[in-house]
Image (tube, rainbow, N blue to C red):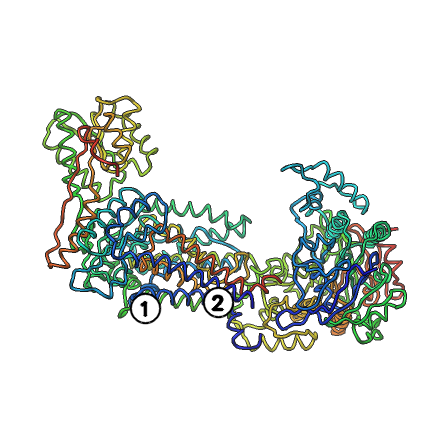
Amino acid sequence: MAPIIEFKNITKRFGGTVALNNVSFSVEEGEVHCLCGENGAGKSTLINLCGGVFAPTEGEIWVGGQPEQINSIRKSERLGFSIVHQEIPLCLNMSIAHNIFLGSKEAVKGVFLDEKHMNEKTRELLEMFHLNVEPTALLESLSIAEQSVVQIAKAVYFRPKILILDEPTAALTNDQREVMFTVVRKLVKEQRTTVLYVSHRLEEVMDLGDRLTVFKDGQFVTTKKVSEVSMDDIVTLMVGREIDKSEWGKSFATGEELLSVKGLGCGKKFHDINFSLKKGEIVGLAGFVGAGRTEVLSAIFGADRPDSGEIFIKGEKVTIRSPRDAIRHRISMIPENRRDDGLITSMSIKENAQVAVMDRISDKGMLNKKKSVELMEQMIENYGIKIGSMDDGVLTLSGGNQQKVVIAKWIGNDPEILLCDEPTRGIDVGAKSEVYSILRDIAKEGIGILMVSSELPELLALCDRILVMHEGRLTGEISREEASEELIMKYAAAI
Amino acid sequence: MNTKKNKLTNAREFGVFLVLVIIMIIMSITSPVFLKTANLVNIVRQTVEIGIMAIGMTYLIIAGELDLSVGSLFATCAMFGGLLFKNQMFPPTIVFFLVLICGLALGCVNGLLVTRMGIPSFIVTLGTMKIYRSFAYAIGNGQSISQFPESATGSWVWKLGAKVGNIPVQIFVMLILFVVAHVLLKKTTYGYKVYATGGNDRAAHLSGINIKNTRLAAFAMMGFLCGIAALISTAYLNTVTTTSGEGREMDAIAAVILGGAALSGGRGTILGTFLGAIIMATVKNGMVLLNVPVFWQDGFIGIVVIIAVLIDTLFHRKDAKR
Amino acid sequence: MKRKMMALVLGGIMAVSLCACGGGGSSSQASSGSAAGEANAASEAGKEAEAAPASSAAPEAAGSETAGGDYNISFVLHSLSGSFYTKLAEGAEAAGKDLGVNVTVSAPNTPSSLDEQVSLLETAISSGADAIATVTWDPSGFNNVIAQAKDAGIPVVAFNQNAEDCGSACFIGQDYESAGYSLGKYMFEQMGGKGSYIVASCGPTDVALVAREAGIDRAAEEYPDVKKITTIDIGTDLTNAYSVIENAYLANPDVNAILGVDVFSEAIGSFIEDYDLSGKVYAAGFDLTEGMLGHIKNGSVQLTVGQNPFLQGYYSVYECYMGLKYGSDYLNIDTGAQMVTSENVNDVEPE
């Protein structure tokens, strides 16, 4: 029997850039086929080819034994593809049910919408995904994690022949991830749905996948059965080199206390938060999405106003009303959502990197080009940002390099305290390890780092101490020695 | 992306520049008088009013805001100045500065309502568009003010409407303003903040930029520039009318958009706006030279705006997609 | 490079459309006059672009100016939004046809926009017009640009509305004061030489309207039993005008006549009709609007005075022609007061 999808010598060029170079492999019906590779390896391009976003420069895609021209999104849908994208293409101003049936003819009676049918079906769907919200709730009232679940639910509802999941779990909690896996497995088993799965989390690949295909720099590397490889093998195939972890685990913390927070609270978001941060120390902030971790960082940074509690910097009580105040107290923050809060997408790499350090590149309000270029060169060297030209748009960079620009921007500010929120979200394995080394280098220089992360291995590897939050309260503090994933989960779930 | 040619076509201003060249070529072929110096000077002279307003509009649009009140603000400044010049309460130099302060203050009112009250600028300036127009009517009691006394017409302020050789002084004023505005936008931290604020105000705020004050300053600048434009117009026309500046807000916005700015903010240049304003004046001039019927002239300007923006998006489609 | 091709194609489309718009003008040069009436009818109705450019001659002719009297006359209005203005343009075009000169009609996109009109005049000067006719409706706003025209040796004829010191070669239009006098004289005769009157003006400080009012007052001086009560400001909105008149009547119930001096006089007729005052209160006004003529027909208004815009347009071009060809002096022409009463109302068309 012919494979359900066959990629034959696919090449895709964007101008001079080759995104995919002569790629050939096939996907069998009813399998979960994982695509692995660093950011920029060509996975997203391949998915967009299936989705009809653009056409291959050379080569053919065969679907169900036939050569097909997937030249539009409609055509892709007609062939049975359904794609869950990394960024959530839903309408925040509309209800869950309306989002799910958007573009579908199923719940339409003449020119009217069949609200009852929509709501019933949506309720069933949400139950299947263990999501306890009303179908009529507006999407914007949901957390990012819940929104991604809705997106997945929508893709599943229309029973696609081929389901493509692009980083579906980036924002999900562990529970939600498990539920999603169950649903996917059921689909595969009962309806022989074919799944193309893209994830940076190799544990998931090992857990869910039947076979995997590895890409590197737009080239096909290999297709293997998941059962025949280990995680380390995959990493080596993807990165093409081994990652040195030997240095990790050493603490740079010194005795001097940089930041101390006493009784901090803010409405319903969090209450009575107490902790301190020492010079050179990396402190992790763990917990489920919605536990109030991001909110604590925002409050310290002055982006939100806390309504109780005190913040001390080097033993001195400070009032931080705005990010400007925070920056004046030499606090920097790497925000969680790179696209929305971190980058100014209309600006160049250099402009983005220096938007918080205007004082260092100007004389009395006049920008000094020489200073700016020097500083940028220094940043590029320090952080290993791979770029064509520093004047290119920031979106020409891969996710990992974008993240490095954001980090560079905040370190350029010469902070004493660095707050990071999910510093490795949505970036590939290679870039992740680079970000880890950068963070460790920063700590080595005596900067205190407070880091929110949902990736437990990352917390375990980097942090000297891990604070765990549950529903707006600190429920535990774990030292590096006693830290384990189980312990963190125990506190996070407040068991 | 490395060759010089590509750098040229990738420049933000390339689309608008291309449109201007096309229009100039067509005009010089079809009309023998188009390329006469006198006509070209005319075109630039007729750019002045829109051009000066479009400078302020560029800052606002890049910062993600909009000002619909500029036409009325202009009229209020003009009527205010006209009244003071006429009744000779103050010497002309003082009136000159009072008009600028008037513009600045009205611009600040817009800015404060937007940044401190959190009302969208479209709504605020839609309101002040009506309010400022009423001010203009009230100042002149519905009538235009003219026949200014010698003390005003003989003063240096009236030199704004005069000529040096064959070139109107106002052209120099406009060019200086464009150069200053370009330097301010491209070479200073303020310009950097304007781009950042319009590009992503959350990221800019988190980067420690005072986005409220950045926007407020842009509104204030807009008002100030309206004051300058009003003074030039008063000196040139020797009269101020309550209806002056009507519809100018849309011309100014169109010039900025022609110049490659994005209404969503974060994108735009002073050079582009300059070219956009010149195109507006060239097209208006050209339509008279070619005897395009009056009823169709507005429509044609609309076509030019849409085609110019289309050409721009086609050249930059890749960027737009990302 | 598909998108760059698209961009070029778009540029091409723009080029062609601009040429097409302009081309209409040049191809119709020979038939400029004959097409004029038809063209204006079309543009008045707001349809068909193609016909309209024919109304004016090609600017190319500027270069090929010859001794045969092939003159270019730029006719710049302050507005084209209304039949009154179209009549002005029709007159100018008819003169162009009769005399064999090229007449180019233009007007600002925003009605009564001083700076747009000045821009049009500047363009006319630099495009080499031989003479310019324009409506000088602002007291001093046109001084600079008329001086520029003089420097370039181009005569400027003012019509319809006059600015005394604007520097124009002459003024063609109604003598406002004597038109007001004619109106007053006629009405006071009707009233039997006695009674009181109110003047309704939409702009009591407007130069032209003040002159008309002065004419009425001069006529009143000849009738010792005629008294003026007051002048009311009815504004430039018919609804508002109606209520102002209503209030004035309630305040002065024994008034015998309400006399308007402008195009909003129509409101007086509506008021008299609604209050059923025909015959009790006399009324008169200016301009031949459809409404005003209706009031004349049903007797609520006794007189309206027309300006004869066609003649104003015609004479403006005529004077330019005479000056250019024969070097004759530019003289002011009073196009007179066209008195429309119930006797001749059926012979006139609304303007």
| Residue at left offset 26%, top offset 39% | C351
* Residue B228 visible here: no
Residue B245, percent from left and from top? 37, 52
Q: How many marks?
A: 2
* Residue C143 visible here: yes
Image check: B175 left or right of A3?
left
Assign a secondary structure to mark 2. Answer: loop
Residue under numbered circle 2: B13
Assign a secondary structure to mark 1. Answer: loop
Residue under numbered circle 1: B35
Residue C259, percent from left and from top? 21, 32
3D distance between C-alphas at marks 1 and 2 = 23 Å
Chain assignment, label 1? B
Picture quadrant where residue C151 is located: bottom left
**Relative height, residue A273 to residue A280 (above, below):** above
| Residue at left offset 20%, top offset 59% | C71
Picture quadrant where residue A322 is located: bottom right
Residue type at tag 2: Glu
How many neighbours does mark 1 have within 10 angstroms: few (below 14), some (14-19), or many (20 or more)?
A: some
Residue B322, percent from left and from top? 62, 63
Name the foreground residue: B7 vs B180: B7
Residue C186, percent from left and from top? 14, 31
Image check: A22 left or right of A28?
left
Quarter that holds the N terminus of chain A: bottom right
Chain assignment, label 2? B
Picture quadrant where residue A35 is located: bottom right
